[in-house]
Image (cartoon, coloured by chain):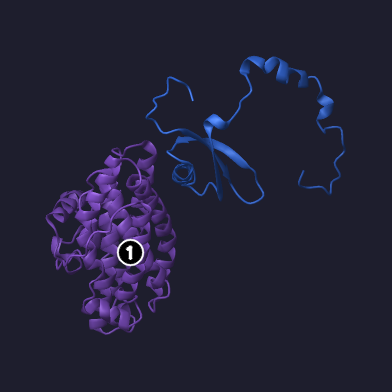
Amino acid sequence: MSSSEDKRQWPLYEVFVRARGGLDHKHVGSLHAADARMAVDHARDLYTRRLEGISIWVVPSHQITASDPAESDSLFEPARDKIYRHPTFYEIPDEVKTL
Amino acid sequence: MSVAVANAGRTDAEARDLFCFVLRLGDLSLVLGQRLGEWVGHSPALEEDLGLANIALDMIGQARLLLSYAGEIEGRGRAEDDIAFLREHGEYLNPILVEMPNGDFGQTIVRQVLIDAFQLEMFERMAASADQRLAAIAAKSVKEVRYHLRYSSGWLLRLGDGTAESHARVQSALENLWSYTVELFAEDDLDKAMADRGVAPRLSEVQAAWSQRIGEILAEATLDRPKDRPHSWHGKRGQHSEHLGYILTEMQHLQRTYPGARW
């Protein structure tokens, strides 16, 4: 949490919603809540109003460790010229429908 | 439509009873939905704004189902909007508790916990009502109400077991509102008839379950259960506090100013 943030403000939580069984939880946004239970309630009210999900995860934002944008070059650029890592050189049989 | 068809085999007296009973349930949801709507734009946090508005919308949804059904039972061609917006003060049959002012956030939460627990015990039992339509409405609504109670009791816990200030405020709200819970369980001839016909649960049974549930919530929230005091003022018989008049003035303003307005 940044030092400039108002201490009286509720902590920030990141919200992840699973749209339906078999899919991953996807990050959908963030919200303020006093505790984890309230964060789930708020997430339910804010992010599943239109049947967007069947399961909710909330994580305190300060628990997330992020990559440094300044290091983007060294972290991600090296993968750019390694196209052989994409499985695009295989012939996919016609019978396979769901790839 | 003839009265006989509309009444689906009920005698006129039975239809009248059912009509009034459905209004009691529907008006509770309608008036509390309107009350909660007053928080929109004024809540302590944006997230609570949406939380309370969601509950308000669930309440209005329950009111629509119930008042539409009441109109059908009555068989005089009144639709949900006619019943919601064109009745007078004394024709509303909601308990007085739901028309009590929002007060501070703590008072709104106390009122909500008391009513959510009541609706939960009612709807859980009414899902097995002999009246198919009420059974279906109860089965749908009970899912909403379970969440409402989760929300409201969660807040009561935080406020009751929170700071000295928050504790004092919700305890005081509880003292102020407690006597209005008496009428929820004061069985009159109509309640008795509904229970006899298997339409609704016995209020004594609902009260016992409610009392236990509320007792557990209050204990966890470190709040003292107020003493029971006699209270003989019944919104469910059309005797209301002054507050309902102000609610209706605002709620009915559009229909009264522009009769039949649609959008």
Q: Residue at x 63, y 51 (%)?
A: A21
Looking at the picture, tell me which residue is in the foreground, B170 or B223: B223
Q: Find chain B in the image and tell me its colour.
A: purple
Work out whether residue B8 or residue B5 is closer to the camera in this orientation and state it.
B8
Q: Can you say whether B6 is above or below B51 in the image?
A: below
Which residue was labeled with disc 1? B118
Q: Position of residue A52 (x, y in %)?
A: 53, 46
Task: Identify which amino acid the numbered label 1 is placed on.
Answer: Phe
Q: Is residue B38 visible?
A: no
Colour of chain A as rendered: blue
Tell me where residue B34 appears, x and y as whole percent.
26, 51
Q: Chain of mark 1?
A: B
- The answer, for residue A8, to whether it is visible in the render is yes
x 12%, y 55%: residue:
B242
Residue A90: horizontal and vertical position, in percent?
A: 87, 36
Residue at 16% x, 55% y is B244
Position above or below: A12 against B101: above
Residue B181 position by quadrant:
bottom left
Name the quarter where the N terminus of chain B is drawn.
bottom left
